Image (cartoon, rainbow, N blue to C red):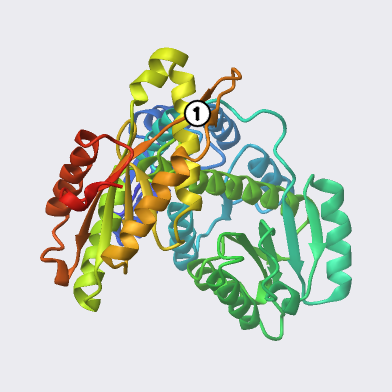
Amino acid sequence: MSGKILVVDDVATNRIVMKVKLASACYNVLQAAGGREALQAARRELPDLILLDLMMPDIDGYAVCRTLKADPATAHIPIVMVTALTDTQARLKGLQAGADDFLNKPLDEQTLLARVRNLLRRGTSALDRRLQDQTRFALGRNGAASGAPEPGRIALVCAAPKTALRWTHALNARLPDDVVSISKETALDGNQAGTDLFVIEAKDSAPTEALQLLAELRARPATRSAGFVVLLPEAHRRMTAITLDQGAHDVLMLPVSSDELALRLRSQIGRKRQADQMRADLEAGLQLAVIDPLTGLFNRRYALNHLDNIAARAQKTGHSFAVLMLDLDHFKDVNDRFGHKAGDQVLVTLANRLQVNLRAMDLVARIGGEEFLVTLPDSSEPQAWEVADRLREAINASPIPLDDGNEVRMTVSLGLTMGGPDQGTSDIATLLERADRALYGAKTHGRNRVSTGTPRSAA
């Protein structure tokens, strides 16, 4: 099954008809015959979507929607209100109650399924929500954001200048966001990265132009993560399904009231903010997976994978590469004399000095407490020796100042080994073992030196 959908309607025939339409598209359909039953089923089953009838004898759809949206366990579930009422006030009341969409009976099957697909694509399942919350907690972001959310930027791409002017004034009066009118050419100029939401009005005479613009904006890096709302003339209602399937986040029929449009746009801005936060959390999680939080260098996991890629490339090009293992000499003395905070300062300074003395193509990573790994692709042994000695000199050339006013002078020992087809091996485990053995040789022969584990090791 591709999604769990709860159908809420006090008329059994309506539930059966809806179930047949949804089951034909392989959705798992649950049913509830009233408001109270809907609340119980939603909390128990945590469906991916709720199709909620508005008029029910026990609790009406407005109250059910408000209750579900107020409950953290169910607030993320998309809710589509379904009713025979066609007046604007009913739609506004439903949207104000927290409904994600509002459909009128009788339902067009294609439009219904397109709306369902649209909401499920951007909806969050209960499991996803729990995983996101766990990630946010692990990243220290479990608390609510402080202060009011920043206003968004909404760009109107209208068919007529008069319409653009009227909506710009009306929406700016109703929304905290910055609403501007732009041309199609401006929308596509590549400078719209700060736009949160595009509202595209389809021309009555050429409605497919709106779909072309939608496709172009979704394909471009600067705008692909924005929200998109398309306004279709009533005569082209049949295009709703294809517009949603092409990536619009919402489709409204013209004419539409400014109040309803404002509510829907504010809802879309909220979803855009959630999507932005999810991307930020994902990026932060990926950073934590490969970045050492103290020094900002890559960690062992990333370094080994990167070294593997260097070795594979060397096999193709025939070029040699170097692997350096570095270890601070007598680092324990720093922690013992000045404390671990001072030790952290030393490690950060060391990381900075290493980075500024390497090429952009080189990599330095922290792989242990005071142990670092440097990879030098496309390097000969003499070049690698020169780099290693430059790094050694960069560390001991000047003392490292501490916050308490003290200074410490540090030295570093380095183990060097070469890899590549002409060096006998590109096996990562073998190279790391050789570099570690060479580092041990540097330590045992007096420290503050570069070693390959051979007599040439003295610096």
Percent across and percent down for residue 97 are 63, 37
Looking at the image, which is closer to me, 58 or 23? 23
Q: Is residue 164 above or below residue 118?
A: below
| Residue found at x 19% / y 45% | 438
Looking at the image, which is closer to me, 358 or 146? 358
Residue with the most extreme bottom position? 205
Q: Quadrant of the rendered structure where residue 320 is?
A: bottom left
Looking at the image, which is closer to me, 445 or 59? 445
Q: Is residue 267 above or below residue 237?
A: above
Q: Is residue 281 visible?
A: no
Percent across and percent down for residue 446 are 26, 34
| Residue found at x 43% / y 45% | 393
Whether residue 23 sits left or right of residue 228 in the image: it is left
Percent across and percent down for residue 172 are 84, 52
Which residue is under mark 1?
345
Q: Is residue 7 above or below residue 182?
A: above
Whether residue 18 sits left or right of residue 327 in the image: it is right
Q: Quadrant of the rendered structure where residue 270 is?
A: top right
Q: Identity of the amino acid at label 1? A: Gln
Q: Is residue 297 above or below residue 410?
A: below
Query: What SS does tag 1 mark?
Result: helix
